[in-house]
Amino acid sequence: MTSKKENEGAREARSVACADAPGREILTDAHEWVASNTGQSLSPLAKQVCDVLQFAGHGGIYNRPINWDRADLADPHCVSICWAGTLSNWDAPHLTAIWAHCAHKMLRVEICPASPRHIRLMFWQRRSRVGSMFERLPVALDQMAFVGAVCSESEDTQPKATPTQDDVDALVKAGQEFVKKVETGEARSKRSYAQFKAALTPFQKG
């Protein structure tokens, strides 16, 4: 018969401390809890998903706002979870936690509507860090670099407003004043330079 001390030791071996909630524990075998409490047979992908979702908030997987009756956990290719709550990237960073752990486990995650009070999280397993867009899932840093590059390119290609006649008149006036102060030795003042620079703004590419 297993002693109380041995049981406690086994529990400690299967759990890790939650860093942002001292005194609480997260079971590392979250998929075992899901299997035993839902009666479903979990695919290898579903086990990975459960182990990811346990980190999306305080406590263990049992605290997640998941409707297990609507979860598809047997499919080996795509796992679908209904989430009855919100997801955010900061303050309560459940969304960030899911993304980070999915990146670590090479899981693609997609969020789509399910019902007025639910969103659906869908997961696919990727097998490589390299390859085509539909085959790979890069590490988190590479994903961030990719998104940053796309955002930068988008900003560069935004159409610029065409300068108006008022812009032209303001530029001519500021330029004349700046030239005059340079010729008279008064250009030490930064005010005319600042006005000239501001007047140039509508004519600059970006």
Image: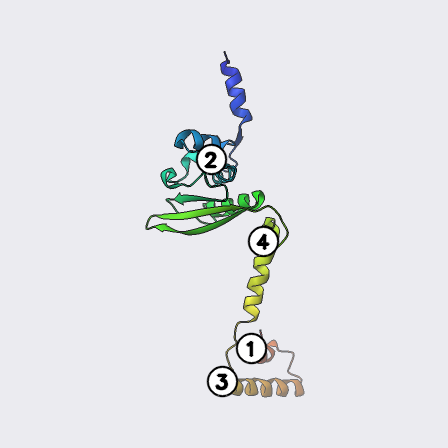
The answer to which of marks 2 and 4 sits earlier in the sequence is 2
Label 1 or label 3, whichever comes before in sequence order: 3
Q: Kindly identify the residue that appears in the image at 37 percent across and 40 percent down.
A: 67
For label 1, the SS is: helix
Of residue 11 and residue 190, the one placed in the foreground of this image is: 11
* Amino acid on which the number 2 mark rests in the picture: Leu
Check disc 2 and report the residue beneath it.
42
Find residue 12 and report its horizontal and vertical position in percent: 53, 25
Foreground label between 4 and 3: 4
User: Which SS class for mark 3?
Assistant: loop
Q: Is residue 145 above or below residue 53?
A: below
Q: Which mark is residue 50?
A: none
CA–CA distance in space, label 1 to label 3: 12 Å
Q: CA distance from mark 4 to mark 3?
A: 41 Å
**Residue at which label 1 appears:** 201
Name the residue at 54% across, 67% down.
154
Placement of the C terminus among the 4 image quadrants: bottom right
Q: Could you classify mark 4 by the number of other residues whose Cα lies within 10 Å: few (under 14), some (14-19), or many (20 or more)?
A: few
Of the numbered discs 4 and 3, the one sitting upstream in the chain is 4
Mark 4 highlights which residue? 143
Disc 4 or 1, which lies upstream in sequence? 4
Q: Circle 3 sits on which residue?
A: 164
